[in-house]
Amino acid sequence: MQLPLALSIVLVIAGLWTLIVWPPFLRRVFKDPRSKDENGAPTRFLKVHFMLVTTSMILGAATLVIGIRTLAA
């Protein structure tokens, strides 16, 4: 795949940004009192945020790989 250098760099930066920013957010969500109910079971708050972070990180990793592959092409 051929992309201009600037676009490839944008993809790499966007992928790295996603992989750097989301893990600390998820750690804060796990520590949030809304994450567990009185019995210690995960709440909808935790499940929704976990899926949001997981999906974002998968897309971020894919973006990073695409950016690196276009730089190498």
Image: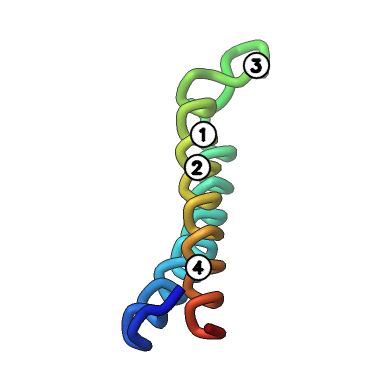
Task: Identify the mark nearer the N-term, 4 or 2.
Answer: 2
Secondary structure found at label 4:
helix
As drawn, the label of residue 55 is 2
Q: Amino acid at mark 3?
A: Ala
For image coordinates 36% across by 77% down, the residue present is 10
Q: Are marks 1 and 2 in contact (CB under 8 Å)?
A: yes
Is 24 drawn above or below residue 72 in the view shown? above
Separation of marks 4 and 1 at Cα, in angstroms: 22 Å
Residue 7 percent coordinates (x, y) = 33, 79
Task: Identify the mark nearer the N-term, 3 or 1.
Answer: 3
Q: Which residue is mark 3?
A: 41
Separation of marks 3 and 4 at Cα, in angstroms: 38 Å
Q: Which residue is mark 1?
A: 51
Task: Identify the mark nearer the N-term, 3 or 4.
Answer: 3
Q: Amino acid at mark 2?
A: Thr
Q: Nearer the viewer, mark 2 or mark 3?
A: 2
Dot 4 crowding, Cα within 10 Å, few <14, some 14–19, many 20+: some
Separation of marks 1 and 2 at Cα, in angstroms: 6 Å
Secondary structure found at label 1:
helix
Separation of marks 2 and 3 at Cα, in angstroms: 22 Å
Q: Amino acid at mark 1?
A: Met
Separation of marks 4 and 2 at Cα, in angstroms: 17 Å
Task: Identify the mark nearer the N-term, 4 or 1.
Answer: 1
Q: Nearer the viewer, residue 16 or 2?
A: 2
